[in-house]
Image: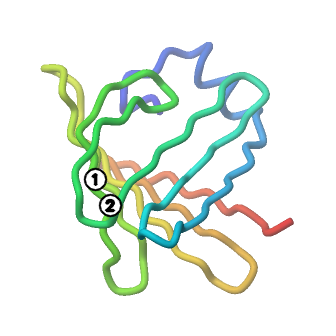
């Protein structure tokens, strides 16, 4: 988050949160991702390969595309504001775990979510 320019207070709050991630796929191929935290919730709806507008948990506005690549769900967020950074999020299910990797410059964030 620091590499994205997120302030120290927001980073501290985010690091203490234990988010819940819910996702589903509708019959028409629309995916829904919900990220629920005690502080803020987000929801995105998309179809694979189709660009859409997204506002991230840290408030950045992006043009986002999600694709399925080599068994991973790859989300590319292209910043719409000058000076902000583009980001990539990879999600992969391994057993009962959802592994999330977010590389940016020389830093890689990883998070593991457990199925409930």
80 shown above or below 19:
above
The answer to which image quadrant residue 69 occupies is: bottom left
Q: Nearer the viewer, residue 38 or 27?
A: 27
Q: Residues within 10 Å of mark 1 (few under 14, many from 20)?
A: some
Closer to the N terminus: mark 2 or mark 1? Answer: 2
**Cβ atoms at labels 2 and 1 below 8 Å apart:** yes
The mark found on residue 66 in the picture is 2
Q: Could you say which is closer to the camera, residue 67 or residue 72?
A: 67
* Frontmost residue, 6 versus 44: 44
* Image: 81 above or below 113: above
Label 2 or label 1, whichever lies nearer to me, is 2
Q: Residue at x 31, y 26 (%)?
A: 61
Q: Is residue 44 left or right of residue 87?
A: right
Which residue matches tag 1? 76
Q: Colour scheme used in the picture? A: rainbow
Quadrant the C terminus occupies: bottom right
Residue at image point 52% right, 75% down: 92
Q: Is residue 25 above or below residue 87?
A: below
Question: Residue shown at 55%/57% (left/top)?
Answer: 110
Residue 24: % across, % down: 60, 64
């Amino acid at each position: 988050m620091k590499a994205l320019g997120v302030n120290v207070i927001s980073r501290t709050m985010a690091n203490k949160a234990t988010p819940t991630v819910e996702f589903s796929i509708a019959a028409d191929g629309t995916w829904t991702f919900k990220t629920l935290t005690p502080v803020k919730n987000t929801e995105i709806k998309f179809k694979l390969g189709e660009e859409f507008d997204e506002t991230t948990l840290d408030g950045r506005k992006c043009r986002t595309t999600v694709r399925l690549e080599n068994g991973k769900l790859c989300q590319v967020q292209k910043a719409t504001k000058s000076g902000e950074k583009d980001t990539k999020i990879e999600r992969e299910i391994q057993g009962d775990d959802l592994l999330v990797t977010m590389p940016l410059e020389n830093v890689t964030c990883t998070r593991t979510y457990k199925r409930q």
